[in-house]
Amino acid sequence: MLLNDLKFGEKLCETFWDCINGQIHFGSGDYRVGVDLGTANVVTAVVDSDNNPVAGRIKKAEVVRDGIVVNFVEARNIVENMLRELRQDLGADLRYGACAVPPGTGEGDFRAVRYVVESAGIEVLDVFEEPVAATKVLGMEDQAIVDIGGGTTGISIVKSGQVIYTADEPTGGVHFTLVIAGNYGIDFDEAEEMKLNIANHRRLLPIVKPVMEKVATIIKKHLNGYDVEKICLVGGTSSFEGLKDVVEQITGIPVYVPKHCILVTPLGIALSCRKGGL
C-alpha cells in the first residue's frame, strides 16, 4: 500500500476514527504503536504490518505543556492504561512503538516524552517531530504540513519527497480557550467546553480570530522563501470553523484540512515506527 496518497491517508484516518470509537480491526500482526502526548489529549494508535489501523484510544489530559511533560506519573498512567486495554482488545502483546515531540524540543524534554512511553511498557524505536510524522499519512508531495495542537504550531515543509524544514512556535488551542475565558469572564474549563462545541464556533469566531491571525502569521513567516503549493492543517485546533479561511487569506496559499485532523499525527507516528530502524 502506498502511504503517499492523500485520499488513501483520509481512508486510513477514517478507519482509525472507527477504531477510536470502539471497532477493533484484527490485523496481520507485528503491531506497532504510536503515542501522541499532546497538550490537550493523549492519543494512542496501533497499526499492523500492512499499515492498517487496528485499534486506538484518546483521552483528554493536561500532562504536557508546549511539548514539555509537566506530570510524568499521570502521563505514564494514562499510556499504561491505554496499552493494557489495547492488549486485551487485540489479544496480543504490544512491544514496539514510537512517539513524537514538537520541532525544536530540547534534548531533556525530548527524553522525558520517550521515558513516559517506555515506562508504560513500550520499547521506543524512535521519536519523531510531530509534523514530520503527519507526512506519513498525508503524503510527501510538495506542501507544508502544519500541526496546530493545544500549545504549539508546528510546521514542516516537504519538497521532492523530503522534509526540508521544520519549526515550532507557542500558539495553539490553549490560546483560543484563554481569549474565550477572558471575553466571557469564565474559568478555563468552561471556556474549553465552549470551544469544543462545534455549534459555538460561529459566534466565537470574532473572539478567537486574532489568535487565528497570529497562527496564520506564524505559518506565513516560516514559509517565506519557500515555494509551497498548498498547506495541510492537522491537530485538533485545525478543526475550528474559520481557521482554514484565515490561514488562506494571510498566506495566500490554498489550505486543506483533513476530516479527522486530530488523528493524523498519532496515526503517522505509528506508521513511521519500524522494528529495527527506519
Image (cartoon, rainbow, N blue to C red):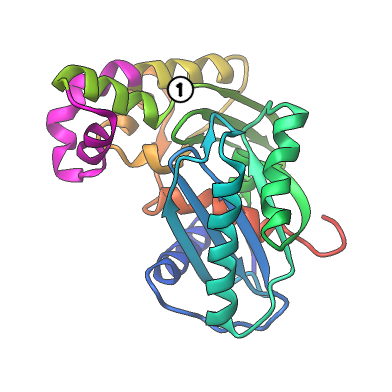
**Residue at the location (46% across, 40% down)?**
62
190 in magenta: yes
219 in magenta: no
Seen as rendered, the residue at the extreme front is 73
Instruction: Please state if 194 lies on the left or on the right of 81 as rendered.
Output: left
Q: Is residue 265 visible?
A: yes
- In the rendering, at what x and y percent does residue 67 appear? 59, 33
**Residue at the location (56% across, 28% down)?**
228
Task: Please say if 145 is above or below 83.
Answer: above
- In the rendering, at what x and y percent does residue 155 appear? 57, 30
Displayed quadrant of residue 213: top left
**Residue at the location (57% across, 56% down)?**
77
Which residue type does callout 1 highlight? Answer: Thr
Task: Please say if 31 is above or below 230.
Answer: below
Displayed quadrant of residue 15: bottom left
The image quadrant where one finds the C terminus is: bottom right
Seen as rendered, the residue at the extreme right is 276
**Residue at the location (20% across, 44% down)?**
198
- In the rendering, at what x and y percent does residue 138 appear? 55, 50
Q: Nearer the viewer, residue 78 or 39?
A: 78
Q: Is residue 138 visible?
A: no
Chief secondary structure of the magenta span?
helix
Q: Can you identify the residue that label 1 sits on?
A: 171
Q: Nearer the viewer, residue 211 or 229?
A: 211
Instruction: Tell me which segment is drawn in magenta.
Output: 186-211
The image quadrant where one finds the N terminus is: bottom right
Q: Please rate how many residues cluster around mark 1, counting C-alpha atoms within 10 Å: few if below 14, some from 14 to 19, many from 20.
A: many
